[in-house]
Amino acid sequence: MALGSHAVTAADAVQTSVKIETKNQGAVINKAIYGQFMEHLGRGIYEGVWVGEDSKIPNTKGYRKDVLAALKELQVPLLRWPGGCFADEYHWRDGIGPRDKRPATVNTTWGGVTDDNAFGTHEFMTFAEMLGAEVYINGNLGTGTPQEMAAWLEYLTSDSQSTLANMRRANGRDKPWKVDYFAIGNEAWGCGGTMTPEYYTNLYKHYATFLKTPEDNRPILIASGGHTDQTEWTTTLMENVPETWSMRMDAISHHYYTLPTGDWAKHGAALGFNESEWFDTMFNTLRIEDFIKTNTAIMDKHDPEKKVGFYVDEWGTWYDVAEGDNPGFLYQQNSLRDAVLAGLNLNIFHAYAERVRMSNIAQMVNVLQAMILTDKEKMLLTPTYHVFKMYIPFQDATSLPISIKGENSYVLGDKEIPMVSASAAISTSGKYYLALVNAHPSESRKLAIEADKTFSRVKGQVLTADAMDAHNTFKQPNNLQPKAYKQKAKDGKLILDLPAKSVVVVELLD
């Protein structure tokens, strides 16, 4: 019998109810909310994605076959590249042309390693096409120039007979690529140049003026915004970047990383933590909702029509680096705690889908809260990967208002967070889906599902385990993975069992 399929009796004590409004539809959940981030950092690209055609690791034109297949299964909608902090020291001409002629450069931001630039513009764009993903390219504002940034866009998008367009053709790509998103700099407050909001805003307007592409291939332009509880970046940009014929701002980025301790000097361990660390991680990650609220309120004041998006284009967990690994590689294990945290964040992004039209988890392979971990020829899927796959039906779905009533508190010490998080939507195929997250590590919950439409059963998947830090290893790659979940109504009542520390995604059926 599948987990959650036991018969419901009158004696079952319903502690919490989830109400879904199917007739009062909300905003579309942009598929880009499920975007992935790949930076020249550690083994995120080299080994993680790219091994080269001569590698003993099975590959297709240099791309790992196992990773490529896993990402296709994930239906990755968007890829962000080349950074991150790396973007503001990356010069795109270093990564084009014959690979044996490309210069070797030092990655001064991440580990001081030498990059042979084997993975450049053509490799990235080809990879995105192989996955059927849109692209988000981050331009170099920190050490670049307006001319360099404009030239990169011309190289990518021009169908003319210009020198740059013909250079692209000579390097193996005849037709222009579609560039969906383009950012002017990254983390301008820090690694991107240690700028003030006012200084960056002027630079944004300067650079954006010269980013010209064919009319049918204009990328969404993204400004580098703030992080954590900052609002001054959003305020300054919204007040000082007007939409004109020669320059525009389509979105503002925002970054937030979840640290168990909240302390950048010692983040906290990826495994072997206690309930206090579990709770603090959940408490800290849920702060992102307040950051979204305060920033989007500022945007609503200046942009009531909601033309400008608020992109959380870097988010996820950041733990202490795995022992013995290069500190600059940011490699960490990924446990059930990360899966629950991912579900909490995705549900928040759904709730604010009117403005939050993109997010990029950091990062896709072998870095921070990764989907995939590799060790040379070995590969495993993380608990976070499984949550993203469970949530695929929410890509481009239409959100539905949802409310939770009854007992819904998880209290530890003097702090309190909601125990249950939920999100509902109508998929592009017209099906109804419900995502549920139980943030409590030891208490299950019975949920009464109420709606203005009759649902008599559910079917889907649940991800949970006994241990808070349950995870997959290269020796046991399938230790933690989703299991079937189903439930039928009894006496007209649809009641779901939500296990402790779990993520459940189900289709609601008549």
Image (cartoon, rainbow, N blue to C red):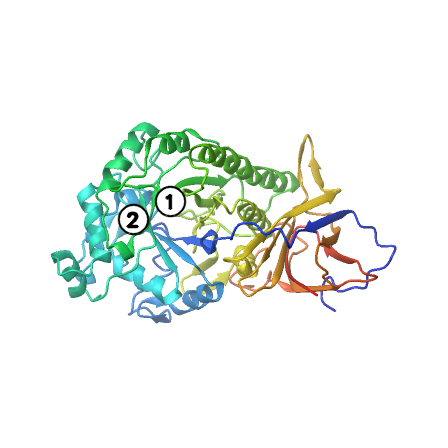
Q: Nearer the viewer, residue 451 or 186?
A: 451
Asked if marks 2 and 1 touch (Cβ < 8 Å), the reply is yes
Query: Is residue 248 visible to the viewer in this orientation of the structure?
Result: yes
User: 10 Å neighbourhood of mark 2: few (<14), some, or many (≥20)?
Assistant: some
**Figure quadrant of the C terminus:** bottom right
**Figure quadrant of the N terminus:** bottom right
Q: Secondary structure at mark 1?
A: helix
* Relative horizontal placement of residue 371, taking residue 139 as reference (left or right): right
Q: Secondary structure at mark 2?
A: loop
User: 10 Å neighbourhood of mark 1: few (<14), some, or many (≥20)?
Assistant: some
* Relative horizontal placement of residue 382, taking residue 434 as reference (left or right): left
The residue labelled by disc 1 is 328
> Is 237 placed above or below 490 here?
above
Q: Residue at x 70, y 58 (%)?
A: 453
Q: Nearer the viewer, residue 314 or 34?
A: 34
Query: Is residue 260 visible to the viewer in this orientation of the structure?
Result: no
